Image (spheres, rainbow, N blue to C red):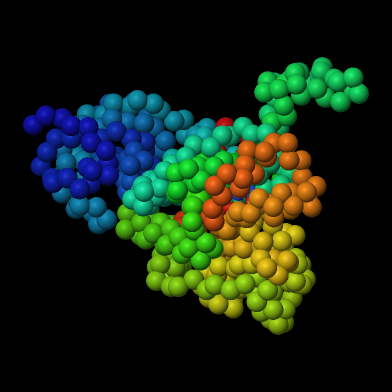
Amino acid sequence: MGKRHIRIAELLQEAPGQSVVAKGWVRTKRGNKNIAFIALNDGSTINNIQVVCEVANFPEELMKSITTGACLAVTGDLVESMGSGQKVEIQAKEIVVYGTADSETYPLQKKGHSMEFLREIGHLRPRTNTFGAVLRIRHAMAFAIHKFFNDKGFVYLHTPLITASDAEGAGAMFQVTTMDLDNLPRTEEGKIDYKEDFFGKRTSLTVSGQLEGELGAMALGNIYTFGPTFRAENSNTPRHLAEFWMIEPEMAFYEIEDNMDLAEEFIKYLVQYALDNCMDDLTFLNNMIDKELISRLQSVVGTEFVRLTYTEGVKILEASGEKFDYPVAWGIDLQSEHERYLVEKHFGKPVILTDYPKDIKAFYMKQNEDGKTVRAMDVLFPKIGEIIGGSQREESYEKLTNRIKELDMDDTNLWWYVDTRRFGTAPHSGFGLGFERLLLFVTGMANIRDVIPFPRTPKTAEF
Ligand code: 4AD
Ligand code: MG
């Protein structure tokens, strides 16, 4: 029988009675003078393979060097396991220690660690059960997103990360420059001379790929983007990152109802994909992090989202008698506490709110006949609040350019955007799903810093 190195996920499914090689990191070692049980994990699954060693068969020094965190290659026989919890285990014949992990200094000892502590060791936390599960689910969701759109014939459009326009009109962008900040080139009036900068103009990291996405939709029909976006807002909350990933589909000929249908179908598809493909990891997270996780996921796939207007939503909030930190009145930008009240307390299911006041939404949203509201839609989720933001877009050249003027926006870098309304304009719609907000929902994790491998937030850019 030849030796085969198989990943532990597959190894655990193999039939006993063969010689195998397993490689991975030691999670725990226990036992006594005669026998040692090593739980080995290689990241392919939440489950460990148990390695059983007759201590007498191995040099003492080698056995001592096998501690939590060490990396091993184990050759042995795959046998039926007597213990509960696993079908097979490895009877070790030969062990090579690739790398030791000194038990005095290796920070991931067996005891449970706080999420705060694990953030400080972001270079090692992927080796924990929780982060292994989260990162595998993150991968599965990324794959499912591409599958969903590919199956529907959407084109994956790569929009730029460096941009001279500010899509959301909200400021809060990270500037990109190669200029020497200690010695800035100046114009005659003493202003910074951006002609001297790398792109010959002032540029930033994008807050959204939408505007370029619309160019794609006006040519290819249905497109989506999926990439990193950047926001320099100083919001230190469990739902905000300075660098997050967003999925932005944009569809020609979609009105807002079609947009809502797609958003609802999309999220349900992703949650169902997780239930179908990530059950081991979900079960772990359900046991360790959030006891209602799986039932919440199941309930979302099986329920029809509520649809109502912002104005109706505000009426419900005003009539609720609830004491909110931010008082409710028509015209305010809803806070997460308001969104969660509607979703969790009032309706008990996801809500799609539409037709927001135009003054709290971006310039590009389609204006309603009332002159006060725009055809916006936010999808609100339990535990999260806003998970999706989108709208039907204003397709009228006149209305769009008037709104840009009204808002006193600098339109020098938007000429190409308004051109879509000059040449063959069409009704169209789109939305943005925050990838990490989706992952908060799907994993049950409480803080957005813990669903991205290396979070970027105010004052933290480690790793
Ligand atoms: O509502 P937002 O700002 O909408 C847009 O950017 C539009 N251009 C989308 C579109 O219509 N194509 O952001 C969309 C989503 C939010 O609903 C939220 O899920 C997420 O992106 N998001 C954030 N996620 C993490 N950290 C932040 N700072 C986020 N800001 C927005
Ligand atoms: Mg929004």
Q: Quadrant of the N terminus?
A: top left
Q: Residue at x 40, y 28 (%)?
A: 100
Residue 106: where, in percent of width, then height?
50, 34
Q: Nearer the viewer, residue 394 or 36?
A: 394
Farthest left residue in view: 1
Q: Residue at x 25, y 32 (%)?
A: 74
Q: Nearer the viewer, residue 262 or 338?
A: 262
Q: Quadrant of residue 128?
A: top left
Residue 168: where, in percent of width, then height?
67, 48
Q: Determine if residue 183 is in view.
A: yes
Q: Quadrant of the C terminus?
A: top right
Residue 111: where, in percent of width, then height?
48, 48
Q: Determine if residue 341 is in view.
A: no
Q: Is residue 15 above or below residue 309?
A: above
Residue 435: where, in percent of width, then height?
51, 49
Q: Nearer the viewer, residue 264 or 369?
A: 369
Q: Is residue 306 above or below residue 367?
A: below
